Image (cartoon, rainbow, N blue to C red):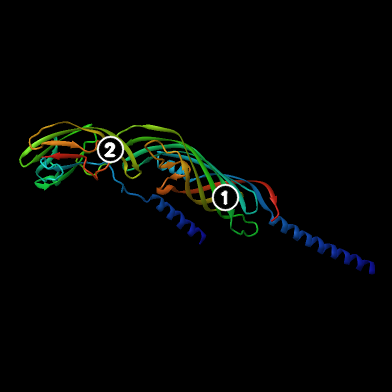
Amino acid sequence: MKKYITVIIVSLLTFLSCEKDDICIETTTPSLVIRFYNNDIQTDVKNVLLDSVWALDKNGIEQYKSVSIDSIVIPLNLNENSTTYIIENNSSKDTIKFIYDRKDVFVSRSCGYKTIFENLQIDNNSINWIKNININNTIIENDTAAHISIFH
Amino acid sequence: MTQRHIFLFFISILFTITVNSQVKEQDTIKNKEKYGLRIGVDLSRPINSFFETENKGLEIVTDFRVLRNYYAAVELGFLDKTTNEDYLNFTTKGSYIKAGFNYNAYENWIGMSNEIYIGLRYGFSLFNQTLNSYTPNVYGTYFIPEALEPNSEFKDLNAHWVEFVFGMKVETFNNLYLGVSVSFNNLISTTDPDNFKNLQVPGFNRVFLNNKGVGFNYTLSYLIPIIKKDK
């Protein structure tokens, strides 16, 4: 009887020790949040008729195809220090090149590291439908508030 | 005739006394309990090393019977283990010492010396962590992050913790013991590396959320009897 109890305890402990105990629930690498405003009344949010949004040499982001929207959340390239986006609004295209520094911050065992972006700047941009761009926050640590305001 | 009777009478009395005393003597021998130093190894470590090439470790376990039911216990060990997580790969290398006592709650039959015990330990470890590689974690697949290999080594880290131990030891052959124990560990303090965390500590094992840990031991140890005491 004693032997059986030992065997049961030992096997239980073996299985318990193999179980995966945590999954990543923390927020990881943030995205860039852009909000669109009316250039005439700069406090008013104004929708854009997005045809498509894409990074240079990439396909369009699925959720921003043919939608009317007042803000977009787009990922930045975390393998390089710059990302160029093309935003097509009502058949008019504008290109914006974002430059930034990257910093990897430890989150947890299951999430590993996230990349945050600092010293966000706009290297250059075209002005077809975009009238003005304002950087609200040069540090991208989370995607709860807009980092960039675009006036059109 | 009377002389002969008296003689027989005395002989019989003496005989019973000697028989009685002999029985008593045998009794006391059986009741003697062994006190001494017990030295052993954790069998699970070499077995783990055999199956996982990136997990090398050894643990020496010792205890010394101080009082009838109390044993002073010390464990010494080292670990060189590489842990692979979803987004991380790191190596922990270091040594540790644990010191404390066990209380044997098992009432043995005469001549047996088995144990079912509870114990308390203080643990201390000195170690290095090396972050071999990581992949930044990002939601979605629009930009696929590249794996980075910083190979950054964080030296001279330490950790203190307490352990509650529950286990048993069985004397299988004379002076040779097989033991199983489980410990529940609670980290008191640790020096975390800059922009990283001690996810594995030698002796403490895996550091779970809220600084808890668990350990298992399967030991084979030999008792060097030093003195024998009456029960």
Disc assigned to residue A116: 2
Residue furthest top in the image: A123
The quadrant in which residue A119 appears is: top left
- Looking at the rendered structure, the kind of residue marked 1 is Tyr
Q: Secondary structure at mark 2?
A: strand
Q: Residue at x 86, y 63 (%)?
A: B11
On the question of residue A59 being in view, the answer is no
Please identify the quadrant where the N terminus of chain B is shown.
Answer: bottom right
Where is residue B81? Give x, y as percent.
42, 39
Q: Output the chain of dot 1.
A: B
The quadrant in which residue B5 appears is: bottom right
Mark nearer the viewer, 2 or 1: 2
- Looking at the rendered structure, the kind of residue marked 2 is Ile
Q: Which residue is mark 1?
A: B177
Q: Output the chain of dot 2.
A: A
Where is residue B60? Give x, y as percent.
54, 42
Disc assigned to residue A141: none
Relative vertical location of residue B144 with respect to residue B227 in this rendering, above or below: above
Relative vertical location of residue A118 with respect to residue B1 in this rendering, above or below: above
Where is residue B111? Give x, y as percent.
65, 56
